Amino acid sequence: MRHRLGTLGQHAALFTALSVAFIGAVIGAVPANAQSTEVQPSDRSFMVSLRQANSWLVPVSKEAPTRTTNAGISNAGRDIFEAHSRLDVDLLKSAIDLGIVLPNDVSSEHQALINEMAERTGDNHDRAYATIVRQAQGGLLVMATQTRATTQNTSIRTLAHQTLQMLIRTMTVLENTGLVDPSALELVTAKAQVNAVRVIGQNIEPSDRELLVLLTQHSLWQKPVSRESSDRARDAKVRKVAGQLAAEHTQLVSAVTEAAGQIGVDLPVEPTTEQKSWANAISSSSGEELDRMYANLSRAANGSLIIQVAQARATTKSVPARIAAQTGLTLVLKHMLLLEGTGLVQANSLQMTDVPAAAQTKSNNSPPPQPDDSSTSIGFLTGIAVLVVAGAGTLWLVRAIGHHGEHRR
C-alpha cells in the first residue's frame, strides 16, 4: 500500500486546524520544554517499536561487513550497527527512567529474518540488506516524526529527536549504495520483488508536487515573519531564533526551487490564506504577545509540516524530491528545537486541534479551546500500524528477494 501526501485541500484544512488557539499566554498552561513524566500509550508504542526494530537491525548490520565485498554495504552496515546500538542504549536508559518495560527477546519473526540473512552471500545478500533495512527505517522515520511533533514527555521527545537525526543520515547512506530496490520506498509492501535496480522515471508523482508546494508555502510565510520577529520581538532569545530561522529558510527555498526546476513543478508565489492570517496576527502584535504568538504558531505549523515531509522522505522515488525532503526534514526538525528552546512554546502547541478559524482570538483573557486528541491518536495508530505491518511483511519480502535471486542464477 502506497502512502502518499493528502490533497492540497486536506493540507489547507489541517493547517487551518493549527489555528491561533495556540496564541497568547494561557494561565496555568505547561511550557513544552518543562519536564513531563506522563507517558501516553502512543509514547510507549513508539519505544516498544523502536526496541523491536533495534533487536534485528543491530545483529543483521553487525554481520553485514563480513558477508559482503561491496564497500558501500560494508560501510553502511558498520554505520547502522553503531548508530542503532547507541540508540538502543539511550532507549533502555529512558525506559528505566520512565518505568517502561521493553521487550528483551527477539520476536520469532525477526529471529527468522536474522537467520535468513545469515544464509545469504554476495549480491543476493547486499540487495536484500539494503532493501529491507531501508524499508524498516522508512517506517521508523514516520513514527519517530509523529512522536517528535506531538509528545509532551521531554525524555521521549529527546529520544525521538535523536532517532530522527540518525535515520536521516543512515537512510541516505543506504540509498547511496545504489542497491535499494524501489519497493523499499513503500511503507507497507504487499507485492515486493527485486529483479534488479530499476531506473526510476521522471514522471511527476502528485505527492512530490504537493511536497514542494507545501515547503514553498511554509517558507513564504515563515521567512518574512521570522525576519520581522527578529527585529521586533522583546525577548532576546526569540529575536536570535527568529533571525536564524529567517536565514535558514533561504536554504530551504533554494533546495525546493532546484527540485521543482528538475522535475517540472510550478511553485506558488503566495502562502495560503490561513498562513497569511497567522502572519498578520503576529505582525499586529507587539512585546510579549508577539513573542508568544511567534513561538507557538511557528512551532505548531512546523510540527504539522514535518510529519508530511517525513512521509515524503520515506516514500518518494524522485531523487530531486528526496533531496528537497531531506533538506526540509533536517531544517524543520532543527527549527522545532530552536523554538522550543525559547521557553515560550505551550504544551497545546504540540497537538493538532479541530478549532475553526472563526474561533481564533488574540485575547489573553479567554482560555483557548481544548485540543481534540482524536486526529493525533489516529496519526499515531496509523504510524504504528505501518511499522507493524512492514515488520511482519519483511520476512516475506526477503524470501521473495531470495527466490528471484535464485531464478536469476
Image: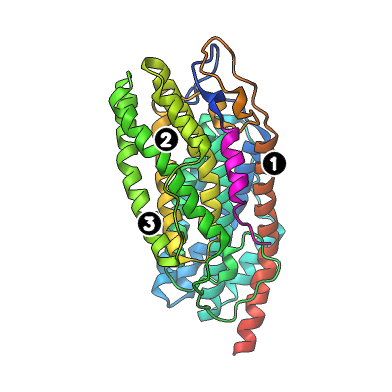
Quarter of the C terminus within the rendering: bottom right
Secondary structure at numbered mark 1: helix
Q: Amino acid at mark 3?
A: Thr
Secondary structure at numbered mark 3: helix
Q: Amino acid at mark 1?
A: Ile
> Crowdedness of circle 2 by 10 Å Cα count: few (<14), some, many (20+)?
some
Q: Quadrant of residue 182?
A: bottom right
Residue under the point 63% across and 21% down: 369
Residue under the point 42% across and 35% down: 337
Image coords of residue 19 (percent x, y): 56, 29
Q: Are marks 2 and 3 in contact (CB under 8 Å)?
A: no
Please tell me which of labels 3 and 1 falls first in the chain: 3
Task: Name the residue carrying label 1.
Answer: 378
Residue under the point 48% across and 38% down: 302
- The region drawn magenta spans 1-18
Q: Are marks 3 and 1 in contact (CB under 8 Å)?
A: no
Task: Name the residue carrying label 3.
Answer: 257
Image coords of residue 261 (percent x, y): 39, 63
